[in-house]
Amino acid sequence: MPRRWVVGLVVWCWKHARLVVAGAVLTSVALAAYAGSHLQLDTDQSHMISADLPFRKTEQRLDAAFPQDVDLLVMVVDAPTAERADHAVDLLQQRLAPRTDLFRSLRRPPEEAFFQNHALLFLSTDDLTELSDRLSAAQPMLGELARDPSLRGLLATADLAIDAAQRGALDKAGLDAILDRLDGAATAIAAHKPVPPSSWQSLLGTFGDHDFSRRVLLSQPVLHYGELVAGGEASAAIRAAARDLGEGVRVRLTGPVALSDANFATVTAGAKISVPLILLAICGLLFWAVRSLQAMVAVLVTMTVGLVATGAFAALAVGTLNPISVAFAVMFVGIAVDFGIQFMVRHEDERSREPDMLAALRNTAGHMAAPLSLAAAATAVGFLSFLPTDYTGVSQLGLIAGAGMVIALLADFTVLPALLALLPAPARTAPLGLKWAAGDRWLVEHCRMVLVVAALLAVAGLALLPRLPVDFDPLNLQDPKTEAVATFRDLGRNPDYGVYALDILAASAEEAASLTRRFDGLPDVLRTESFAMFVPDDQDDKRAIIGDLAQLLGPTLSPATLRTAPSLDELSAALHATAGRIGALPRADAAQRSSRLRKVADSGSADVLAMQNALMEGLPELLDNLRKLLNTAPVTFDDIPPEVRRQWISADGKWRVKVLPKGDMENHDRQTHFAHLVESIDPNAAGEPISIEKSGHVVSVAFAKAGGTAIVAIGLLLWLMLRRVRDAALVVLPLVLGALFTVIGCVVTGIAINFANIIALPLLLGVGVAFNIYFVVNWRVGLTEHLQSATCRAVLFSALTTGSAFGSLAVSPHLGTASMGLLLFLSLGLSVLTTFLVLPALFAFLDRRRS
């Protein structure tokens, strides 16, 4: 902006201060209302990366093929036993089913019921034979339990087991399993403690061990992306429904929706901590910088006006903010404060020499027109260079922050002078420079040494660039103690849950079979899954074994008559009788076991009923499952339920092939290796490991290209405005050095570059350009005492203000926000040191060469 225009504008605004301030207030109110009604927040993290990239299109094709797996809110139900877990998840589903206003779908994994009903056909022939022998041996006891599913029936089976053991037909382990079940309950009741749960699945041996006491309920909630917690209402409903599901039952939430909600809830919690610290830091350092309450208020009001206007521009230009672009407010405050401090410090310094306020303001405008305009233009160019990148979050940020720099400049040349007229401060009696004369002399005397050290550090930073720690796993940005993250990692440790599995769409059954054969046997692949797995192998042999077992157990499990429920007296009598049988056993612990059972029998109805309820829980379900398992009908593709088919075959006939990894997939290197392995066989795979690896690559490339483009564009702009290649290079060189010094700092401190803190790069460009321009412009007009100047004071306090604001982010419980604060503080500090040390040393070296 030409100097005479700036001076004229500043003077006019000062003379018409009331009109300008009133106009600014009214305009700000209107713009704030517009931004509030039109600016939305999109918390969907999938929108952070361009949807036009190949891997994103693959994800979209998979989502379109299986829409039931999109936007899942997963309920993980853990219970002491499998039976109790089944009961709890069914009850939870019943309670939530009527809430169609909150849930678009609610289901258990459809494969679960299918495999339960046909589980025996999916065992190996050897395992099925072993299970058949075990159930055949337990036939008498199963018959007794089927006829009398009560504590009396269980005690009768214990008597049968004792008889079998005495005949040598039952080994010690088999007898102990029954006696331990009775004794454990009796011991707990005698001690007035809850009876430890015991699963009837143990009756099935190793087959029953596969029925974990964990169940999963899948839901697709109605999401509100305009809110920080898009699935908040659905999550609250789940937690309300999860109350009183039974003793020992725990329900946890995870999945994409819960992780996203937890992420932004933690960000919000962190903001409640950091925002007051930021405001306190800005106010305190502003007052310290300008030494005037009126001047501090003027800068803060001007900054607020500019921030509101930038928010309105964001509403008009993009309409929706993502988790990265919402940081435009932080960017604006960080750099707008710099512009305001530069103007105010120069004004206060001028007033120390010129008592007439208008004349001092005119001088300030004349001196600051070029450097502030140049700083705003270069900073805007730096931000706008990120606009064409595939990292949508930062491209939006670049557009908004770039426009914000122009808005901040206009506010400083209009609103700030008007506020100074309405809030006049006492004139200064001394310049506002710093008493750093010794520093100026030292830099002049040791300029060569400073430049050599800076060059060596730059070379070291360049050498360490390949070792720069990076971590683009979005899960590592969140507090690991939050329920959604902890549960997700818990599921991830068991590869059977497929958290880190990769999916491929095959055009046909033949292609799916071909893919399965190529993956099977690879050392890093646990197994592959497809629709073909629902038709078991060797069915004829297995059906013959099941048929024999059905002939033996069928009548046993479905007795013609059932015994009537026992009375309390009958239960007590049965306990005494079994206690006598146990006491007569030739065992060292027989007397103690017998005594505890008698104590329960004699203690009253409450304890007897408690023992029956605890021991018989889940028995009816077990017997019912056994009846279903004895079905000898073959399984064909036509027998597979439609809901299972929809999970594996899309509406247009595409087959899903799922590749499950082996090993610890929380390790980033293993994730990357697995992603590359699967892509080497089929490049159209999609899933968490590929998304993390590809997104990280996109962000890294985007920032490398945008950073290089920004430096070149800023250099060209500076050359056009300064008209000297040397002067443009003097502004750009410290930017490069500051970036390389930041690399060293990250390697030394272990701060990893991630999705959140990588926005330090555009901020570093913006702030660094502004700082360097002020020094270079001063040197162009003949200033040699750089560290003693009012400019240095303004840069110092601007850096302290911005650094304190960003440093306060480091206390956030959100790891991404905390790392952002740490990296911004580190990069800003190194950038300021470069400006204060390297630039004056360069000036001194060039002056010495010129003289």
Image (cartoon, rainbow, N blue to C red):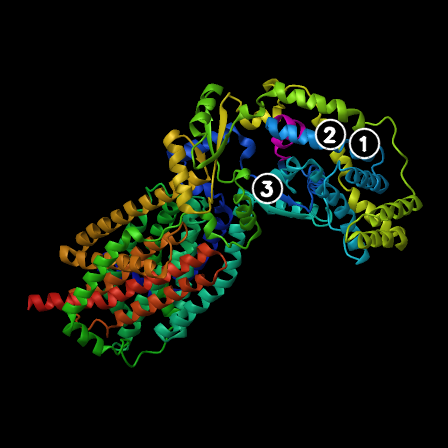
> Residue 120, located in which quarter of the rendered image?
top right
Q: Nearer the viewer, residue 724 or 837?
A: 837
- Residue 554 located left or right of residue 318: right
Which disc, if any, is residue 143? 1
At 60% from the left edge and 18% from the top edge, which residue is drawn? 636
> Residue 223, located in which quarter of the rendered image?
top right
Mark 2: few/some/many CA within 10 Å (<14, 14-19, 20+): some
Which disc, if any, is residue 74? 3
Amino acid at pointer 2:
Ser
As drawn, the residue found furthest toward the bottom would be 429
Mark 1: few/some/many CA within 10 Å (<14, 14-19, 20+): many
Question: Looking at the image, is mark 2 or mark 3 nearer the viewer?
Answer: 2
Mark 3 element type? strand
- The part of the chain drawn in magenta is 106-122
Q: Which residue is mark 2?
A: 136
| x then y, percent, for residue 491 | 55, 44
Mark 1 element type? helix
| x then y, percent, for residue 90 | 70, 38
Q: Nearer the viewer, residue 9 or 290?
A: 290
